[in-house]
Image (cartoon, rainbow, N blue to C red):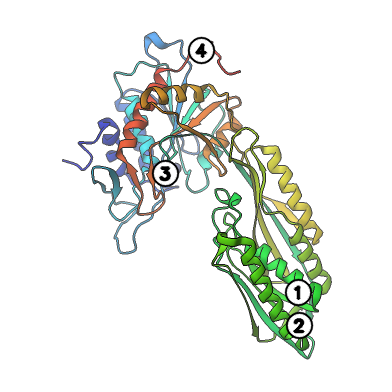
């Protein structure tokens, strides 16, 4: 007997276990695709595949329910493969071994792939559920969500016909998601002239470390320190009082992380050594006071170092420091409709001195409103141009604007209250989801996202709470049973 046989809802766990046997890392989804097409054929459902590899399986409506609106259920077929270093696992052939402790299902030594295997499993269980009387159900399985969302990016607007969609890729039972942010990168490249280092000077390395950092979407509003901004303040402050020249500035790393560390090398007159060191120490104390408990580990150090080969010309230095001073970072606007939702933000992600006297400044902007995303990107662009930088934007991806009058939201809230006797939370997230891309292509589509509780997704500690899988199933079935008539439009 297998590990999950006795768990409820048994059809969901049956399919989940089947899926665990199929290797399906992003961009290697051939076998899960074949499995889904075979499933459709065995069960006599219509199925189709598009050019990029997304699959749609359609369950026709029950004869008494042909007047119901069509509903789309969506999951993604790929997963993230992470394993413990000492655990042998070949992602191209080995099955995932799910284990249950009665409360949670996890995998031994690897990611479980409940993100989003549980979404696929519940779709298959819905498709084959003989007791469910419903209108037409279209099950959409996208490819490559985890490494670029190329499945959702390349969806054709005629691939499915439903205009109500439930995304099955959320990880918090009790929370209904109704929005996400779009994003864009704004990157500045500036050139400077380098000069020779004069005689009689000394050099320092300055470092800013120990900050919390965090995800540039989920954590942008928390007020954590930005090491690039802090280093820039130190340099600007020093350059206002002393004759210093910048030789190096290296801060931040990933475009979607708030920068945690920055390092700079400067030169100065020997006579100002003590004053500069004291100034930096005072600055550190002021910062600790400013941040209070939020950034207790913040460290700012200054140390003598060897004389660098070259320095930046004064004019470029002045422009760079001014530009970074103007460049915004953090939450820019909050949602007018939803409490505690950051609507628009920007992350000053990194500054790097690269070869050929080039400085690269990377920033990312997010917003659930596309026009606001473009506005804040233009604001950042203007700041970078102050430094004489050449500015480029990435193509970006669209957001999904929350609609509190959504019909599917009302249906889901009612089902949730009826089944579990309490109100679900309604939230939007300040990060990207496939829903943003779908929202842009399928004009007027009404969407919601919910799921069971999954912890530690994308790590070998990934686990799914069994109790919440039962709730997920009950909720989904009840929502599908309550999809309104075609000509009934409750959206105001
Ligand atoms: Zn996912």
Disc 3 target residue? 78
Which dot marks residue 439? none
Residue drawn at x 49%, y 49% is 147
Q: CA distance from mark 1 to mark 4?
A: 68 Å
Disc 2 target residue? 268
Q: Residue 205 location in percent, x, y?
A: 65, 79
Disc 1 target residue? 238
Q: Residue 5 location in percent, x, y?
A: 20, 37
Q: How busy is the neighbourhood of tag 4: few (under 14 within 10 Å), some, or many (20 plus)?
A: few
Residue drawn at x 59%, y 57% is 224
Mark 2 element type: strand
Q: Is 414 drawn above or below residue 102 in the view shown?
A: above
Q: Which of marks 3 and 2 precedes in the sequence? A: 3
Disc 2 and disc 3 in contact, CB within 8 angstroms: no
* Image quadrant where residue 293 sits: bottom right
Residue drawn at x 48%, y 43% is 145
Q: Which of marks 3 and 1 precedes in the sequence? A: 3
Instruction: Say left or right for 358 vs 436.
Output: right
Q: Nearer the viewer, mark 2 or mark 3?
A: 2
């Amino acid at each position: 007997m297998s590990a999950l046989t006795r768990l409820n809802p048994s059809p969901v766990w049956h399919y989940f276990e089947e899926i665990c046997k199929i290797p399906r890392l992003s961009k290697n989804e051939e076998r899960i695709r074949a499995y889904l097409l075979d499933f459709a054929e065995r069960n006599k459902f219509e199925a189709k595949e598009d050019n990029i590899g997304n699959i749609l399986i359609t369950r026709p409506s029950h004869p008494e329910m042909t007047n119901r609106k069509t509903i789309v259920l969506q999951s993604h077929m790929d997963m993230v493969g992470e394993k413990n270093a000492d655990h042998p696992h070949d992602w191209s052939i080995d099955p995932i071994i799910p284990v249950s402790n009665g409360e949670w299902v996890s995998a031994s030594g690897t990611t479980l792939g409940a993100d989003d295997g549980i979404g696929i499993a519940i779709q298959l269980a819905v498709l084959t559920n003989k007791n469910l009387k419903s209108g037409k159900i279209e099950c959409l399985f996208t490819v490559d969500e985890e490494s670029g969302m190329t499945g959702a990016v390349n969806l054709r607007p005629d691939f499915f016909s439903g205009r109500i969609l439930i995304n099955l890729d959320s990880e918090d039972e009790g929370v209904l998601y109704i929005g996400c942010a779009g994003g864009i990168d704004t990157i500045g490249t500036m050139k400077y002239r380098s000069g020779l280092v004069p005689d009689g000077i000394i050099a320092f390395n300055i470092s800013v470390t120990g900050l919390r950092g965090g995800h540039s979407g989920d954590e942008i509003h928390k007020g954590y320190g930005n090491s690039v901004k802090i280093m820039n303040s130190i340099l600007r402050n020093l350059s206002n009082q002393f004759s210093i020249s910048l030789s190096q500035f290296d801060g931040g790393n990933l475009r979607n992380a708030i920068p945690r560390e920055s390092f700079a090398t400067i030169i100065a007159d020997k006579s100002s050594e003590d004053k500069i060191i004291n100034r930096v120490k005072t600055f550190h104390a002021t910062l600790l006071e400013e941040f209070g408990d939020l950034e207790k580990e913040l460290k700012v150090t200054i140390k003598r170092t060897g004389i660098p080969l070259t320095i930046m010309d004064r004019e470029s230095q002045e422009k760079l420091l001014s530009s970074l001073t103007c460049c915004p970072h953090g939450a820019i606007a909050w949602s007018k409709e939803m409490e505690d939702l950051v609507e628009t933000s920007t992350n000053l992600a990194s500054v790097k001195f690269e070869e050929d006297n080039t400085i690269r400044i990377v920033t990312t902007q997010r917003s659930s409103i596309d026009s606001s995303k473009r506005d804040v990107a233009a604001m950042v662009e203007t700041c970078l141009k102050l430094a004489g930088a050449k500015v480029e934007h990435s193509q970006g991806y669209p957001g999904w604007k929350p609609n509190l009058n959504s019909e599917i939201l009302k249906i889901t809230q009612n089902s949730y209250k009826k089944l579990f006797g309490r109100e679900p939370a309604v939230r939007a997230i300040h990060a990207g989801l496939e829903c943003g891309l779908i929202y842009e292509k399928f004009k007027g589509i009404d969407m919601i996202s919910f799921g069971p509780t999954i912890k530690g997704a994308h790590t070998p500690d990934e686990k799914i709470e069994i109790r919440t899988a039962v709730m997920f199933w009950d909720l989904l079935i009840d929502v599908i049973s309550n999809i309104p008539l075609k000509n009934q439009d409750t959206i105001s």
